[in-house]
Image (cartoon, helix red, strand yellow):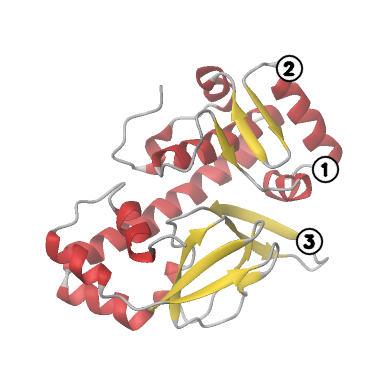
Amino acid sequence: MKDVHRVLIDKLREHSRLSTEDLTAIRNLSYSLRQLDSNEDLVQQGESPKGAALVVEGMVGRYHLQQNGRRQFLSFHMVGDLPDSQGMFLERMDHSICAIGPATAATIPHREILRMFETRPGLGTAIWRETLVDAAIFREAITNNSARTMRARMAHLFCELFYRAEVSKLTDGNAMQLPIGLSQLGDTLGMAIATVNRTISVLRASKTMDFRHGVLTIRNWQGLAKIGEFDPGYLHLKRPPLR
C-alpha cells in the first residue's frame, strides 16, 4: 500500500509549493482506507460526505446517473486526485463517484482539511487550486464533447489521461494502465459502442496509439496530440509539456 500522506504531497507539488510546515501538517492528517471493487460507488449523488476522498490506488470516475439507468461519465481520477473535494463546500453531492476497476481511496475528514485553510493558508490554497484544476478539466470536457469530431474527442481524452498519468509518474514508458471499458468510453464521449470501436480502429490505423486489454499505449505523442487538438495548458501543471 502506498504512503497516503506521500500520495497527497506528491499531487499538490505538481502545481503548488509546499513549505516544511505544510508537509508536517499533511503528515498529521488522519484518514480511513476503503477498498473498492470495480463499479462500486465511493460517493453517491445526494449524499453529504464528511470527508474528502483521495485516490490511493487505481482509478475512479465521476458520473451522473440518468433516468434510464445509464451513467454519463464526467471525468476520471487517478492516484493523488481529490475527486470529491467540492463536498467540503456543498451541502450535498450533485454527482456520484465509482471505481474504474479495483481501487483504493483514503477519506480525510473535512474538519481537518478546513482547519488547514485557517492555520496553513498556503496549503489551503494548494488544495483549493486542485479543485480549480478539476473545474478546468470539466470545461475542457464540454468543449471536447460538443465541438470536436469523434476521432478528435477520443484522441483528446487519451492525451489528457496519459499526460496526467505521466506527470504523476503513473506510466510505464509509453504505456499506462487504463481500465476503462468500451461502454464507459461511450458514456464519456457520447458515442455508441459501435462508434467507440470504429473510432479506436481509426486511431490505431493512424499509428499514434493503441488501446486494448485496459492498457493505453502511445505510439506517436505529437501525432495524437494534433489529432485531439490537445494543449495541456488547462491542466495548470508546473511540469513542461511532454516530448
Estimate how packed mark 3 is, as few (under 14), some (14 to 19) or many (20 or more) residues with alpha carbons within 10 Å. Answer: few
Q: Which residue is mark 1?
A: 192
Mark 2 and 1 residues: CB-CB less than 8 Å, in contact?
no
Q: Which residue is mark 3?
A: 70
In the depicted structure, whether residue 20 falls above or below residue 243: below
Q: Which residue is mark 2?
A: 205
Q: Position of residue 108 (x, y in %)?
A: 40, 75
Residue type at numbered disc 2:
Ala
- Residue at the spot x=75%, y=29% of the render? 199
- Separation of marks 2 and 1 at Cα, in angstroms: 20 Å
Residue type at numbered disc 1:
Ala
Q: Position of residue 62 (x, y in %)?
A: 59, 60
Question: Element type at marker 3?
Answer: loop
- Residue at the spot x=68%, y=16% of the render? 206
Q: Position of residue 85 (x, y in %)?
A: 42, 68
- Separation of marks 1 and 3 at Cα, in angstroms: 12 Å
Question: Element type at marker 1?
Answer: loop
- Residue at the spot x=56%, y=40% of the render? 143
- Separation of marks 2 and 3 at Cα, in angstroms: 30 Å
Closer to the chain start, of discs 2 and 1, is: 1
* Quadrant where the C terminus is found in the figure: top left
In the depicted structure, whether residue 226 falls above or below residue 237: above
Residue 18 vs residue 36, the one in the foreground: 36
Question: Element type at marker 2?
Answer: helix
Q: Quadrant of residue 201?
A: top right
Residue type at numbered disc 3:
Arg
Estimate how packed mark 2 is, as few (under 14), some (14 to 19) or many (20 or more) residues with alpha carbons within 10 Å. Answer: few
